[in-house]
Image (cartoon, helix red, strand yellow):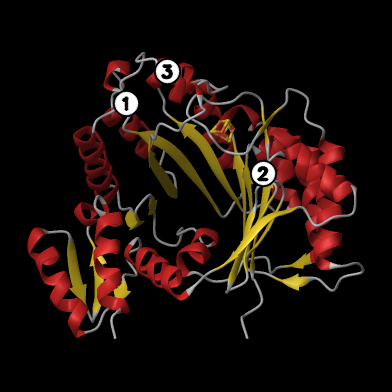
Amino acid sequence: MTAAPRHVYVHVPFCARRCSYCDFSIAVRRDVPVHEFIDALRRELRIRLGHPHTPLDIDTLYFGGGTPSHLGPDGVTSMMVLMREYFRWTPDAEVTLEANPDDVTATATAAWWRAGITRVSLGAQSFDARVLDWMHRTHGPSQIDAAVELLRETPFTSWSFDLIFALPAALGRSWERDLDLALGKCPPHLSLYGLTVEPGTPLGRWADRGEVQPGDESAYEREFLSAHDGAAAAGFDHYEVSNFAQPGHHAQHNRSYWRGVPYLGFGASAHGFDGATRRWNRAAYAAWQKAVVGGEDPIGGSEPIGDGEQLLESVYLGLRTTGGLAVGPEELEQVRPWVAAGWAQIDDGRVILTPLGWLRLDSLAAALTPVRGSP
Ligand code: SF4
């Protein structure tokens, strides 16, 4: 029997504008249909969990997107009131809201905190006005500064910066400067992502037309490693490929994904996993909303996770964190050259990748999986 999910994700799809690199399932709206969204979310919860409903005990709740902060202070409050009808959590549970700096106002942070948000993930991306403009972000550097002040003044348990590295060289972005500015604000947590060129995005079209030359692999490696060194010197634990935390600020919700435990997902495009089968909702906001208004489960598809996939996933997930992967004698032989190359270390029967190893995560996970799967 699989364990009951103790982690819940809610996808809030609204954004003021599509960022140049973004291929997420979003709905661009200047005026967010807050009531329509909350009503649709209520319907999905009712359809899938039943009503009346004894609240399920959970450990983490994560509002991602899209831009959940774009719901406004009252919208976030209404969403939290709704979630409490279906879920129960203790005051030390992690309740994260993704926010864009231009949505972080004194009114908003006070309302979020009163509503029970404990952690804010701030989509800063860069402190360079030209770069933010190129990314089609709706905020400037001064709004990041103002947002950080407000996050510090509000008694949230934690907050985090998102930054993007490996930008096209022609932009002349100084990654060292951005990193220094971010570290100088002493965030409890950092998430750093390398830019990828996705088809169908403005960036994808610029690249297809030859107007943009994506950043090369050596720049990616250099910036990733300099982030590791800089953050480590500032006291951060680089505990997962993309994530860095000060002591006590490791993100709990994402850990559930890395550990492969069950979780529930609500909202357009949201994924869920019950321990054996993965499901996902219809991706487009309009299709998701129409389904739930019609009384249907808005499922877009599902797939059972077979033994082979489960194996690859467990290797991949194990290798991406400093928790590492427990290995047997045969795997140890496979891993020894990685240790010699500086890609991994072995600690108490576990293989733990180094930052150099994380740069090769996909190929190392693929190399280890057949060894692990052999009789
Ligand atoms: S704010 Fe986030 S979700 Fe919205 S368009 Fe930009 S990157 Fe995508």
Q: The C terminus is located in which quarter?
A: bottom left
**Residue 298: image tag:** none
Say which residue appears at 80% left-offset and 50% top-offset: 41
Q: Amino acid at mark 1?
A: Pro
Q: What distance separates the C-alpha of mark 1 from that of mark 2?
A: 27 Å
Q: Residues within 10 Å of mark 1 (few under 14, many from 20)?
A: some
Q: What distance separates the C-alpha of mark 1 from that of mark 3?
A: 10 Å
Q: Amino acid at mark 3?
A: Trp
> Label 1: which residue?
214
Camera-nearest residue between 226 and 149: 226
Residue 161 spot, x, y in % from top left: 46, 41
Q: Are marks 2 and 3 in contact (CB under 8 Å)?
A: no
Q: Are marks 1 and 2 in contact (CB under 8 Å)?
A: no
Of callouts 1 and 3, the N-terminal one:
3
From the viewer's perspective, tell me whether residue 75 is left or right of residue 373: right
Instruction: Give the answer, above or below, for where 318 lies relative to 73.
Output: below
Say which residue appears at 92% left-offset and 69% top-offset: 52
Instruction: Give the answer, above or below, for where 192 lies relative to 107.
Output: below
Residue 359 spot, x, y in % from top left: 25, 49
> Label 2: which residue?
283
Camera-nearest residue between 215 and 355: 215
> Label 3: which residue?
206
Q: Residues within 10 Å of mark 3 (few under 14, many from 20)?
A: some
